[in-house]
Amino acid sequence: MNDVPGLVLDSETRHVELDGTDLSGATITINDAMQAGHCVRGVKRWFGEKGFSFSDFLKEGIPAYDFLSTEDGHAIGIARNKIEREHG
């Protein structure tokens, strides 16, 4: 169980939903972060704080499950922006 309304995380299956949208197979990219209004410098700092590899993120993105499992407000906002852009 988590404290983020609308976020469903299943650690056994790595299933993730946000606001009813299945993001299990989704990848969050630097473009997603920038489209949500974040700068590269801030995203790099956030990745360092969370213990993720920023260079891997730039190359491959990060699975939505891993990103959202932080339950961080910035991550939630970026994912919600991605949903809005891709699913209207």
Image: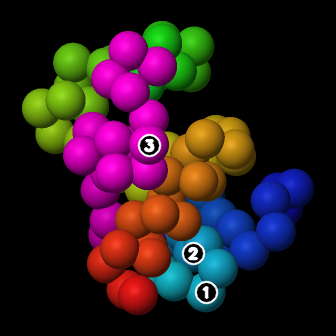
Q: Say which of 78 and 21 sits in front.
A: 78
Q: Badge 3 is on which residue? A: 37
The answer to whether 76 is drawn above or below residue 7 in the figure is above
Amino acid type at image mark 3: Gly
CA separation in Å, label 2 and label 1: 6 Å
Give the tally of numbered discs. Answer: 3
Q: Nearer the viewer, mark 1 or mark 3?
A: 3
Residue 72 image offset from top left, x and y in percent = 68, 40
Look at the image and say whether residue 32 sits in the magenta stretch: yes
- Name the residue located 68 percent from the left edge and 71 percent from the top edge: 8
The answer to whether 19 is drawn above or below residue 8 in the figure is below
Q: On residue 20, which mark appears?
A: 1
Q: Earlier in the sequence, mark 2 or mark 3?
A: 2
CA separation in Å, label 1 and label 3: 23 Å
Amino acid type at image mark 1: Gly
Q: Earlier in the sequence, mark 1 or mark 3?
A: 1
Q: Badge 2 is on which residue? A: 17
Q: Which residues are magenta?
A: 23-42
- Name the residue located 69 percent from the left edge and 44 percent from the top edge: 73
Few, some or many residues within 10 Å of mark 2 (<14, 14–19, 20+): some
